Amino acid sequence: MTAIPTHTNAERSLESETCRAVVFTIANHLLALPLTAVLKVVSQSVIQNDYSNVQSVIYLENQPITLLNLHPCLSTVSGNNVSNKSALSAGTSGQFLLITGLQGHAQWAIPVDQPPTLMDLPLSTVRQLPIAYRQLIQNLACHVSVLTNQRGLSTILLLNLKQASGLVQ
């Protein structure tokens, strides 16, 4: 007699539930934000300001937006998710800007290394990050999604936008 695995409705629901997220690269790390937190993506070339320091303001369509440069926080932590190591070694602060914001909060412009992609992240792949690693990345993420694909494992940090915004205030 074969045993038939039984799953509760909650377990079955979790297996099929996903979060629509924008996935992007910063300093050789994959990060994600929920699609609802991302307003638009623009090329760095549309911005005329020099935003080399961690805290500055850029102007996009004559609107001031606080720059949220996460490269310094993540470039000291080794990341092996992305094959493009040249961005990290060159010290670039991103070719694209991810314009994001939370309801009731200011907008932020996050420099990212490559054009972001839209993904459905299965909730069943989300795990809590160890406290030591969270502290190492200044609590920019508390959770991670680990996905298996053709190239192996992809580790995607789920960006805590409120915590990240505190780094520039």
Image (tube, rainbow, N blue to C red):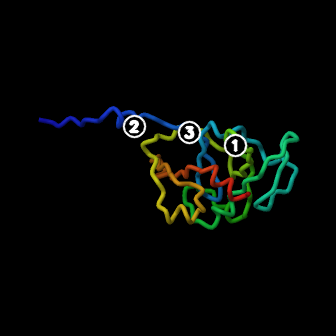
Residue shown at the point (45%, 35%) measured from the top left = 17
Residue at 60% x, 62% y: name it.
138
Nearer to us in this view, 78 or 90: 78
The amino acid at mark 1 is Gly
Dot 3: within a 10 Å radius of its alpha carbon, few (fewer than 14), some, or many (20 or more) residues? some
Residue holding disc 1:
101
Q: Categorize mark 1 by other alpha carbons within 10 Å: few (<14), some (14-19), many (20+).
A: some
Question: Looking at the image, is mark 1 or mark 2 nearer the viewer?
Answer: 1
Question: Marks 3 and 2, Cα distance to the nearest angstrom?
Answer: 16 Å
Q: Which residue position is annotated with label 3?
A: 119
Labelled disc at residue 164: none
User: Residue 127 location in percent, x, y?
Assistant: 45, 51
Q: Secondary structure at mark 3?
A: strand
Q: Quadrant of the N terminus?
A: top left
Q: Quadrant of residue 82?
A: bottom right
Pick the front one: 165 or 157: 165
Q: Amino acid at mark 2?
A: Glu
Question: Label 2: which residue?
Answer: 15
Mark with earlier residue (1, 3): 1
What crowding class fits label 2: few (fewer than 14 Cα within 10 Å), some (14-19), or many (20 or more)? few
Q: Residue at x 65, y 62 (%)?
A: 73
Compare marks 1 and 2 and give the one earlier in the sequence. 2
Q: For the residues carrying marks 1 and 3, which lies nearer the camera in this image?
A: 1
Q: Nearer the viewer, residue 97 or 14?
A: 14
- The residue under label 3 is which amino acid type? Met
Residue 59 percent across, percent down from the top left: 85, 46
Vertical comparison of 74 with 158: above or below: below
The C terminus lies in quadrant = bottom right
